[in-house]
Image (tube, rainbow, N blue to C red):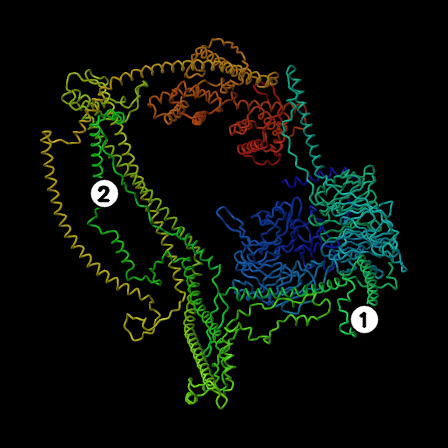
Amino acid sequence: MDTTQESELLGEEEELENENDISFPREIVSVEHSFGYDCKKLFNLVLVDSDTLVFASGNFLNYFSISRQEISFQETVYGCGVGFITKNEHPDFTNLFTVGENGARPTVFIYEYPSLNVRVKLLNAAQNCFTAGSYNKTGELFASQAGYPDFIITIWRWEKAEVVLRAKSFQSDILFVHFSEHNPILLCSSGLSHIKFWKMANTFTGLKLKGDLGRFGKTDFSDIYAMYMLQDENVISGSDWGNMLLWQAGLIKFEICRKGRKPCHTKPITRITMKNGEVTTVGMDGYVRVWYWETVDLADPPEDDLFVEIDPIYEFKIADVELRCMQKIHPFDESDFTHYAQDGNGGIWFCDINTYDVPQKPRKLYSCIGGRVLAAQMSPVSPHFLCMSESGKLFVYQYDEQRLILEKEFPAEGVDVIWLDTNISVKGTELVAAFKDGILRQMYLDLSNGERPKMTRVRAFKAHTSPITALTVSRNSSLLLTGSADKSIFIYQLSRDEHQLVDMRPLGFVQFAAVPNCFYWHETEPTVVLVGCKSGDLYEYNIRTEVTDRETYLSYNITENSRMRHTKFASIKSRIRRDIHRENVKKRKERKRERKMNEVEKLKKANPGLQIDIESALADSEPEEEEEPLHIPAVPNAIIWLRYTLRDTIWVSMAGYDAGYVYELEFNAAEPVRATIIAEADDIEIHSYCIIDEFIIFGLHNGRIRINRINPDNFTDLSEFRIYPMHDGLKGTIPKIDISYSGEHLLTIGYDGNVFLHKWNGPKIVRNKERDKLPPLPEGVTQIPDIEPEACSLEQEKINAELRRQQEAADAHDRDVLSKIGALQNVYFDIIRINEELPPGLRAKDTDLLLDDRITRQIRNELQAELDDVREDLAYDLEFAQVGHTKLYNHFLKELVQIPFTVAPLRANVPGVSTFRLQALGEEHAQIKQDIEDRLKREHDMGLHDYVAPERSDESIGEPAPESFFFGRDPKSIEPRFSRKMMRLLTRYRKRQIFEVRRIFDWDKLERQKPDPNRNHPDDDAQIEDAKRNLGDFKLKIGSDYEPKSSETLTQKYIEVVECREQYFAMVDAFNQMVLDLRERKGELDQFISNKRNRLAVIHNYLPEPDRQPLDPIQETDMDLEYPELNLIEHYTPGCGVEIDDILTLEHSVDQVIARMAPIRSTANVSLFSLHGLDVPELHEHTAFTMLQISKLNRSLPNAELDEELLKLPPKSDPAYYELNDDGQVPYMMETRHRWLRQLLVEQDAIRTEVDEEVRQFDKALEKLQVRRFHVKLDAEFMTAFMNSLNQELYILRDSEEIETQLLLNAKTAMSTRNDLQMVINSTNRQLDELRRNIDKLGEQIVALQVLFATTVKGHKFFDFLRRIFKKKWRPPKVARGDDESSSSSSSSSSSSEDEQADNKSLDSLDMTTIRLDEATCPTGLDRSLYDLAFSMRSDRHDLERNVRDLTRDVENKRKEIAEMQIKMKFHEEVYQREKNALLQFRRNRQQEVNKVNISAILRMDQLQHFYDGDDYRDLSKAILFDADMLVDLRRRADQLSEETLATKRWHRINFIHLRRMNTDIKFMRFEITRLEEEIRQAMMKKFGIIVNLDELEEEVLRRYIFDLETNAEDELKALEKELLEKQKELARCEEELVLETQNNTEKVNIMTVLREENNILRTLLDIQNKNYAKWANPNALNLSYDIEKLRGIEKSLLDQIECLEREICALRLKSKPLQINYEFEVDPNAQPQVVTSEILPNDDAMVCPAILNVDAYMLPPMPDEFIMDRVQTIVQKSFNRFFGKSTTPENVRRFAQRSSLYLCQAAYSFQGRYTDRIAECITEHLQTFVPKKYFIHISGEELRKLFNEVVAVFDYERSDVNTEELISGIFDHAKDSLCAHVHLGDSEVVNRTHFIVAHMFKELIEVLPLEEFQADETLRMIVDVLEREPMVDPRAIAVEQLIDSTLQHAQENLIDGITAVPIRSLGSSIQRDLIKRRQYKQPSCESPMSVRIATKKPGTSSGLPF
């Protein structure tokens, strides 16, 4: 039997037990019929055969017979709703359908039809619910999809009920799963805002289900209800907006819609199929459309608009339905196209989508409610009931015939409906319905004709402006209330009209502070009502029914606060839960305390003298649990229903967090006074209730009804109840429960769309008798028109009526006032008329007629208000115009440098010159340049630089040789005693040494700078290489070997684009500036011509008309063309400038004021006196014109006539010249007149000539500028084309920038790695050179030391002896073999016999005497200082030789490192070259793309040069275009090379001559050097008699001088040394005394520590004895031999312990170490143990050494075996050698390690592996007695801890003295004895005897064994061995879970901590498994595997008990 079946049986047993506690039967209610189904659920329709449809309805499966129109139903197994229902479409499985049930154990049932037997159950596929299921094409696999919270998709091989694959789908609901029909390993799932593509793939770990989530990209997220996988693995899916989405590789390839971007469907698509290349889609809009898919396959939409437009080839309109599922009637008949369709609006349809013939018309087969059912009411007089759906439809059913008889639709969503009772409705067929549009409709249901029922609307009221939320009728049916979201209730008074119909009279409304949600009427006071609100508020209101029309004349508001009581619900649920939790914890602790008390009592009885601390024994060991904080909902929950109670309190049922309880409220209480918990309904909302006699029925949120029997003594006692699952468990909330008129039927409705009619078998309450015939609609009553939703409410009508009344009164008052004003106006006009008839002087002004200033102010204010109104009216237009102006300006003109204009010529017949439209560079251009600079910096940092830092050569000057004449002493201590003469000698010597060193350095530097004659100059090589690469080779970019430059980057292209843009801007702007200058010149010229024209006009006024010559015509300036910017100047401002005060008095009209404001221009008042006196030329000319009377001349005379006329005049000397002649003319005046006129003519001609010249020059300049404009435009066009080419190249570079950056980064990384490694190599080479130089320096120092020694002891009589001491060779020290520690004090004393042999070979002839001097003793006659100097210098030489050896070793290591790095360098160089080549190849490929960009170029014929023979030179496709300067440079370079060759030859000739001169000079210098050396030798011979070295001479002089100085100071030095020696001896004596005192104190501390340890040990042993006293006092009589052996072992251990204690006491008395370090002890077996007494000191706890606190430490053997000792000694010796091996000899390290290992072994045994600070102090203190302190200081505390842990790790602690195998055998014997005792006593509980034995063993094992040993494999083996020897043990009878429970209970009862189920389960399962393996069971044929033999005791002499 599996666990599921066991749990089901256990559940059935619990139900049977509960049945006995319930007094009413379960059959008190039974389902009679289901009137609907969840038609909103997707795919809730399955065709099981051609005549039967199956669909889910709540917790039932409905079977609908199409032919009989009958429904039968089957209850689900678990009663928690149906997740999905589907069918296997394979022909072999047509008789099966699949149901996925929700609940605590969601299960998939596969039923057979028509037997309805379950063929297969699929378990453990979900945690709570299912959402979808589907079969594959072959029908072998089934996919189930789980819902919240796991969302697991499971692939089943359903016939075997085995899981193939399983995976997590998505984090939201999955609504559809689809297998591919073409590829069996592919499937996909979809749902809320997602689609996922799955693939069953074989991996190396097995078959896996891999899923890829679809990415919507730019498309909006959509819920997907249907999809279809194509043969090419693309997927078609639907969308929320009705279009189809084509998915490819997890992405949307494109979206499919109808032509004109119309959606494929207006609502989501629910089904997609494909057949013969045609895709059929079914949408919720009621359409079925067929699409030709090849059109979609061939479509290739652009990437920026991924839409494919296609029209369907067929279209079927089913009806105004919501298609959610379609089932083909004959799925395997290709010629049949009929389907059954699920209508989401309520119903099932038959439809035909035949594309080959005329389809049949759709017809509705089944009707029901679509969506949630909000309200229902049963008829009070007939077997009818009505329901209201959320869409506002009313459905009337006749339940005795189980049919729908009427369906009525309303324009608004429904809220509630009431079927009026017969108390008020005589007819019994009247009802009232409330809707969300705020309208209350009263209907009459005419059921007189059962075949044609009608529903008539007789009244309608709109009392609310917000949706109605609740509806109720009082108990006496006199009042009707409606609650609304506007926080009010409206009251209607019910009565009867003349037709005996219910009349509803509005009384008024009561305003609250919350939204009403439910009502309840008082049982005794008919006008008192309770109002429950959605915010948790509760009101009680006493309605006043006597409301007069006068009170509601103005408003329906009849709210009276005095009639209202209020309280608000406060959440206490979290506090109730906390109190319950506290009570449970308290009870648990009390039970635990009682159990402990019982144990203590048992222990006291067993041990009468035992003292037990009751408080500590009963103390609670559990930690206090941290309580969760109280939770108060932030948003108050709504009151669902409420009612009065017998205690005058109010019962309320809450929603949300506070659900699961029924609370009692009081108006004066701040919170609920009581709370009744609803068992098995915690957190479940109670949405409805119904009381029938002694039963109260609850409708729950989870779709279940709960029938409770009311306790007459306590109405809050709801413990006796039954629960009936009816509606859907997830969305089947029950809002209403109603009882029929006869009390025989019960009606429940749910939000899942289901209506269940139940048969009530309990006590019946008959409300009315059934009427045989229902009355029709009374005559004279007709249907009234419905109220529009936008109509006013009753309150608004009252308000509007009052407003209309006020408006009429105001209009009447206005008419009265206007009539009075009219009469006054007539009087005023009469006064005005009389005033105008008076003379002007007597007339009164308008201002005089103003009677009151207030009238003026009022008029001014009115005018100002009108003016403000006008401005306000025009403000929008003004703002609109300004915004439009701004936008146009910004778009067309703002970015321009200047507005384009044209300069026209003045007189020439040529077109004008126009500027170019040029856009300014702006801030963006500057930002681009800044960005370019930043990019240049980044690219420079990212660039590849092959430069590696060169090796730095050592240019430092060396130091002079050491001054050996100071004998190794400090010169600073000797130089102060030098005489002046010797100091000058020393200074001269040192200067010469420094000069020689400097000279050597200069010569070396000069040699290094000397050029190599076999190599060229580096600069020449670089120029040669550059010439080889570039000279004459232009590296064409189209060539395959072209290497793009690193500078050819995106940034450089940006620079080119920017520079081109700037060049274009500069060129065009320069031309525009020239045109602007020309326009300014024209303006100046126009001004000049205007001035000249004015002057000419003045002249023409004085000239006769025939002589007047005007200027030649000049073209007028077109201001719009030449000065377009003037049109942008605003010349007008808003307003006309007229103020209110100007027209306030009506003296002037507005036009008159505007005319007065116009400027008046006139020259009538101008006089000659205004021309500033006589300085004005015009005055002179006008005076001359007047005086000379030039106007008398008709014309000017020609020259000849003028000459004749002037000759006729008398001369000036003649007085007649100034007098009148005969003609009355004065000759002077005549001549002057002609002369003045001639001047004017000359001026006229000059003006005309000047103007003509200026105009000609301007026109000429304009023509030149026109030609230049052509060239500029040509250049601009080509530059624009070039800029386009640059932009194309820029786009190519930009697209490839990311890849190039990555490649560049790779190359840079490789280059950096290579360069870093090269730098390391260079650094290592420098270090190598430095080491070599150091070796050379050390060699020089050794040679200098040898020279110094030789010069110091030269000629001494003990020269050979001292030389033998000095020349003794140094060898590395060897390992010392002796025990003498002083033998390793220095390196000189570690010599061997080989050294002595080597020294013997170095003896010379002077040392070959019979007596060989000992080096250890200074010979008599040898100066002690010289003797010590020889040893000192030998030691110095040895140090130098050791340093040379170390440096040589370092040199070899460096060479090896360089060799290894060279190998790495080669590898990194290859990597760098590979990355560099990849970058180069990418740049070449990019360059090929750039080469495809076309560039325009203009060539002249003289720019073409051909290098091949031929006749046709027009083909330029393969020509090369390059700069001609390159050829010039090549030719120039050839000339330069020729010149350089001649110059080189010339320099060679000069240098050759110079070389000959230098050779001559060298010969001369050599001759001079030889001569000077000869003179020096002669001078030395004269002075010294021999040739001497001045350096050696001076050194010898200084040496002797210093020796003489030091000899005098030796006596004083010896005295000081003697005094120092005495002080050192005194210091050593003091240190020894300090060491002795420290040792004495340490020994005393050790003695005190050991005494305290003994005290603690005895206390510990006493505690152990007290704890085990109970077991030792009552020993078991079983297996006495084993106990005896155990006691003997304990006795032996105690003797050993006593012996250890005696030895420890002896050691302390002898003041030796507290721990033994000897291998063996001689034990006297007859010695008696000594009794040791110890005194407990006051400060024991503070000073006890923790190392000896454990009792077991003295029960262990004193020393480990040899193997462990060797390992420990190796570890310690290795550690000591690492710590202080360099400070002492290896022999000392070995000796210290051997002595310390003995101590650490004993410490490891004593301390049991625990290491604390006290233990560290103890170990450190004792180790210092073995290891000298000067070495021990090298060991840190952490290193000591690590060493001790390593020693401890060597040991294998075996602390237990008890043999585990013997212990287990004894426990097994005890278990058998206990079993026999139970059997003999007749205990019937012992059935499974094997299990009894194992359980008994486990109980004893957890008491005696540690948890680690209990889980050990060795313990398992021993138990299995013991059980295997007993034949009666059957391992299959061991129940592991029961074993765990019994063992844990035993541990809890006996206060055994640390025992959990994990080790018990592991050990029990292992025992069972191993025993089964060993015995190899076979199933017996007749015996039960649980049978166990019962053995009896037989007399015998065996040691164990017989079984």
Q: Is residue 311 above or below residue 1206?
A: above
With 1521 as the anchor, is 1705 left or right in this view?
A: right
Quick check: can you spot residue 1101? no
Quick check: can you spot residue 1927? yes
Helix, strand, or loop for circle 2? helix
Q: Is residue 2001 above or below residue 100?
A: above
With 782 as the anchor, is 1892 left or right in this view?
A: left
Disc 1 crowd rating (10 Å Cα; few below 14, some 14-19, many 20+) is few
Q: Quadrant of the C terminus?
A: top right
Residue located farthest toward the front when viewing the structure as drawn: 1215
Q: Amino acid at mark 2?
A: Lys
Q: Amino acid at mark 1?
A: Ile
Residue 768: give x, y in percent of width and height.
87, 51
The residue closer to the viewer here, 1188 or 666, is 1188
Helix, strand, or loop for circle 1? helix
Q: Is residue 824 above or below residue 606?
A: below
The residue closer to the viewer here, 49 or 1541, is 1541
Q: Quadrant of residue 1576?
A: top left
- For the point 25% across and 32% down, the residue is 1338
Q: Residue 831: which numbered mark, if any?
A: 1
- For the point 28% across and 38% down, the residue is 1330
The residue closer to the viewer here, 799 or 52, is 799
With 169 as the anchor, is 1642 left or right in this view?
A: left
Residue 1152: give x, y in percent of width and height.
68, 72
Residue 33: give x, y in percent of width and height.
76, 52
